[in-house]
Amino acid sequence: MIHSLFLVNSSGDIFLEKHWKSVVSRSVCDYFFEAQERASEPENVPPVIPTPHHYLISVLRHRIYFVAVIQSEVPPLFVIEFLHRVVDTFQDYFGLCTEAAIKDNVVVVYELLEEMLDNGFPLATESNILKELIKPPTILRTVVNTITGSTNVGEQLPTGQLSVVPWRRTGVKYTNNEAYFDVVEEIDAIIDKSGSTITAEIQGVIDACVKLTGMPDLTLSFMNPRLLDDVSFHPCVRFKRWEAERILSFIPPDGNFRLLSYHVSSQNLVAIPVYVKHNITFREGSSQGRFELTLGPKQTMGKAVESVLVSSQLPRGVLNANLNASQGTYTFDPVTKLLTWDVGKINPQKLPSLKGSMSLQAGASKPDENPTIIIQFKIQQMAISGLKVNRLDMYGEKYKPFKGIKYMTKAGKFQRISCLKDNVVWKTLQPIPALISKDSSVVSGLMFAQPVRHSQ
Amino acid sequence: MSSGSGFGDEKGGSSSVGEPEYGHDPASGGIFSSDYKRHDDLKEMLDSNKDSLKLEAMKRIVAMIARGKNASDLFPAVVKNVACKNIEVKKLVYVYLVRYAEEQQDLALLSISTFQRGLKDPNQLIRASALRVLSSIRVTIIVPIMMLAIKEAASDMSPYVRKTAAHAIPKLYSLDPEQKDQLIEVIEKLLADKTTLVAGSVVMAFEEVCPERIDLIHKNYRKLCNLLIDVEEWGQVVIINMLTRYARTQFLNPNVNESLLEESGEKAFYGSDDEEGKEEKAEAAALAKRKPYVMDPDHRLLLRNTKPLLQSRNAAVVMAVAQLYFHLAPKAEVGVIAKALVRLMRSHSEVQYVVLQNVATMTIKRRGMFEPYLKSFYIRSTDPTQIKILKLEVLTNLANETNISTILREFQTYIKSMDKDFVAATIQAIGRCATNIGEVRDTCLNGLVQLLSNRDELVVAESVVVIKKLLQMQPEQHSDIIKHMAKLTDNIQVPMARASILWLIGEYCEHVPKIAPDVLRKMAKTFTNEEDIVKLQIINLAAKLYLTNSKQTKLLTQYVLNLAKYDQNYDIRDRARFIRQLIVPTDKSGALSKYAKKLFLALKPAPVLESPFKDRDHFQLGSLSHLLNAKAGGYQELPDWPETAPDPSVRNVEVKDSVPEWTKCSSREKRKEKKVEKPFYSDSEEESGPTESADSGNQSNQCWLSFHVLSKQNYTRVFLTRICCLIKQSLLSGAEEKNRAQKVKGRRSGSESESEEEEESESESSRSESESESESESDTDAKKKKKAPVTKPPPKQAKKESKKEKKEMSLLDLDDLIYRSFKILPSVTLHSFPQLSRLHLLKSPLLTTSCPTIAPSGSVKTYELLHRITGEGLGVEYCFSRQPFSPDAHMVAVQIMFTNNTNAETKNLHVEDPKLQSGMRIKEFPEIELLPPGEMVTVVMGIDFCDSTQAANFQLCTHIRKFFVSIQPPVGELMMPVFMTENEFKKEQGQLMGMNEISEKLTLGEKCQNEHGIVQRVTSAANVSRVPCGSDKECRFAGKTVSSGILVLVTVATKEERAAQLTVNCEKMVIGTMLVKDILQALTQ
């Protein structure tokens, strides 16, 4: 399946290679570099590139391209998903998955890759099993290793792979038994100029950090499980039980893992917690444009909207922006034309605003693109979908664990607000083409929120 | 220094540690020695005694390998550390070895013996790792060693080692494809493995080595379906993809008559199980097309078992299930995948990219499926361009009359994007919407025309090209637009756009008679500066104008043609020459010029704007080939549905397996029953009242049963299936049955030797009943097996009862048959069968008096308890039903059958005064109040024999007499089956060695030379169950004693000829010895 793997950094150097079958020359990456040159943005490199003898399937994470070399038919998602799993594992081991981290830990990386694939077919990809095979480097262990000459390789042979619950390592022991769950929700919305929602979706995950002794069997129930209409589970979750009773029943892996992720689709009504009023105008023939933007909270159930960050890609014709922020700081990068405004917390009594003028290139015609406004924010103590965990029970072990649940909402990474120009309506056929209207282009923005937190 | 000396030994006894030798090695040239010096320090470290130094050196070497630096010259120094005790050093040496062994084959051989030793290690993980590295060393010379190791590991008792063996298969295959045949054997064996750990890996090996051998899958199909959910995620992907292909070859297209699908369910039910229906079946091939479609239960099984995997966290698994549903599911069910695919769109952009490609293909065939999720495909400004373009594609495919206005509004936003490639794609998308949906064509056209005044030239150019295509559809109405576009020639510079405008004006010059010549005039002026593509269109325009309006344009045309004549591009020169000949009549021009007008001004069909994803679905979705729209190496075509389904019985698994598999359908009829399950279930009970005629009632029961067959535990299924067959035999064809019974009756008076023949004739008759002339051999085999319980009792009884009056025979016989088969069910199941018991009650009122929980199963030997002469007309027989005795699990269930052969009633039958050995207990049957003359009744009692073969003595009392009787169990009846896996078996067996093991050599009897025979004989001699076994030379069985639960393990290993060895492991030596004797006798007969 996967023949070889090359790691390529943003400047186009191959800094690591690994072969699972016979060696493939690194010159095969030339095809990748060609595609990279053609692509305008780093993320526009096609994930699958055919070459005369091989196929290159790549993913881009942390500004590193992971390029897998394939020789014959294989489902591309299989490879892509595996490469992402590799990155997740590296992140899990080294905290960061950067070029430097990989170079520093090249031996561990090599050992990991060796265990994860056998002859190009995935062998052990569960982090619990891998950690039994190869201990993650820690500062303490590094020091000890240098002194004693001992190693990162696990002394005992791994048994996890042989057990009925391959995701959990055996013989787990803790003095403090704790189980924490984070309900994190992200909202993506597209809102038009008039403020009406075009589409809004919630993507939620429940991440768990479970540190429990032995083989605990947990059940987690929700107050309102019907909200979760499209769910994907960690393999530990018993699917039948969920189907029948809407209860999550599972023997958890040890440590951090993603228990489930869910999707509240655009068909449901999603409350939008923030509104934006804006007016961005350019006048024909003038070298000035006006910029006005005000933010306000909406449907936040009294929770504060925090860490608000507004960004907008202004049209290329804008030379500079001279603005006045009522709170926070703004920056405008004249090269990339990116305007960012770090608002901080929204005070409902005194709404934050950003006003001022933009100077345009002299003589240039009025830009006809609409800038999009992207808003990121967090709202504490609120899960935007309304999902609530009811209770967590443990079976199979005698001790009493400490349980904690935290709700968070985060801004989705794709939010944007785009707006329609309201004066262009393609309704009637006009014999002579009308010019695209003279008035200003406008955009409206998007928002998202952050979660709520209670500890039990 | 064990490693050092080990290495020395392998070198063939050279006593000194080898370093100096390398220097003299003739194979290493001057370069080698310089390299040697370069890595001097590393070599020293590797040769040192300290593990920490070795480790440090290995780490540096691995870092070199990772960077792609050549470290091959260190091979000799590294390879001798292969036996190092330190695990990390060892692992890094393995890494090095696998990387460079191919280049240094001779030296690599030195390491082989270490791995061979590892293969024998008691620790399964070490065995596995040795096999893994050994098979990764790509050295042709060790192919035989690898082959041996793989074969051995394939029957290892550790599933982990077997998994590693499966991984090793493709490695060996790529090294030496000539081993294919042998490897297929190993694959076949591993495919039969029942552990989830192995399943994914072996299917992967199957796909790489012999994907064409679809026949290997038959027997494992149901097992794979059932295991699927527990297989690790990567294996799931491979298995699902393989099963998709498999299903395409084995099942019928569920969408073959899509429109009929709704009603056909009912029809199928009524149509297919009356006599006529069966006849139709016989001519299946001819009628297949007309028949309503009924899904094969195996097809359904696959769909049902893959559906939960849509919830997997792994995108590849979700995609695999989605493509399976897309290719295999009935149209109405495909919709379930949409939600899951939309969820994947929130994943990494690479995942989105692949998913969108597949969604784009799906939306062409099944638009309705994704319509509810339209908004999820809206484009965000932060999406990478390639994602945007794919989303656009999906949106365009989804557009229809109802949603087009929303989509167009959205498109309007996109046109203002700063990403110009995306804007161009949007304009094309608008063009496609306009061609596909007539209602919005004018709106779109108008919008596009507005775009012509856009500041961005690329946008304008793209619009021109699209408008040109749209105008071709209805040019008369749009002369305004053409005029407007003509004006654009002054400004627009993009060659493709200019060419498009010129073509338009030329084509529709009649609509713009005044402007066209003017445009040509301007173009003639700039001709020399135009791009080639524009020049060609200028020539075209000139030619067309010349033909329609030669008065105004003759000179212009001449001028243009003259310019073209001297153009640098030969295409243009050619074209000019050709056109001049064609349009300007000269002496030489010949006949063609007459047709010039027809040639140039022919009506041109409007272009069809199609999705690039059209017809991509002939590639299996989710595959690399689909993504690239080109066949990738190793791609297996997705076959078309067969016209008629291949024999479904090939997937039947034989009964011999102790882990019960699906019911064997002994005939096509059985299949039919399963098929109709659905429609029937919907109108359940009412239909099949007990008062209905035997025929129709029977049918409904079959259906009803078959529903349960699917839903119950496996073993129940087996029994239920038998019941179905039994009912059918006994009731459905009542007349035939009577005939048969008469035949039986007739034979009864005959000699015993006829009984075998009788068996045959019976199975024959039942076969013809079930109309399965086309059955395969295995099918017949399976049937014979199943027939066994049915056919065996009658002859036996016949023998015994031959002296009885004949009058009772036929009816009794029949009742008895049904009765027994019903009783096999555990009580719970029976209770859930209201109709069945009702039906049965009708037929056999005797049931009321008997305990409903227990009954004999399978081929049961009957023993005489009381002869009817000594019993003064009361005949009593007993048999061991082999069912758990529910009141007390430690008792053996004994079924007792009373027959009243007198003319008077027998009353108050009961047990009295049991005389038992110490420890033995007895649970009497409830008193039988009345046994009318000529009747028979069956009851069950439990006896705890304390695991001894001592007889249980007691008195059997009637209202007038007492009889002393005794029941002595054969040792084989003192146990009950235990289900265990091969590993458990081996483990248990390992603990029962020495004194507890009794072996005997034997010569197999004529009838039990094959596996079936052995299994049949052993299970009839002792109540044990089969244990799955990797080797076909061995049959294993397990049971435990009923009373004390002591394990009894039986192994029959066959050898050459008819020799075999029987081994029994049991803590109780007495039981063991006796069992050996009994089985020996059974096998040698």
Image (spheres, rainbow, N blue to C red):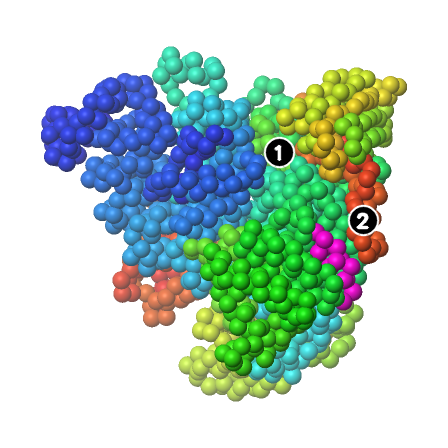
Q: Are marks 1 and 2 in contact (CB under 8 Å)?
A: no
- What is the CA distance from the residue labelled 1 to the residue labelled 2? 54 Å
Locate residue A258 relative to residue B1049 in the image: left or right: right
Q: Is residue B496 above or below residue B344?
A: below
Kindly state the secondary structure of the residue where label 1 is placed: strand
Closer-to-camera residue (B697/B17):
B17
Is residue B478 rendered magenta in the image? yes
Q: How many marks?
A: 2
- Three-letter residue code for mark 2: Ala
Q: Residues within 10 Å of mark 2 (few under 14, many from 20)?
A: some
The percent position of residue B863, horizontal first and vertical second, equals: 50, 67
In the rendered image, residue A352 lying in the magenta stretch gets the answer no
Looking at the rendered structure, which numbered label has been put on residue A434?
2
What's the amino acid at mark 1? Arg
Residue A416 to residue B174: above or below? above
What stretch of residues is rendered in magenta?
Answer: B474-488
Residue A258 numbered tag: 1
- Residue B425 in percent (x, y) is at 65, 49
Indicate the chain on which mark 2 is placed: A
Q: Is A223 in front, or is B61?
A: B61
In depth, the one of B227 and B233 nearer the eye is: B233
Residue B317 visible in image: yes
The quadrant holding residue B556 is: bottom right
From the image, give the main secondary structure of the stretch colored magenta.
Answer: helix
- Chain label for disc 1: A
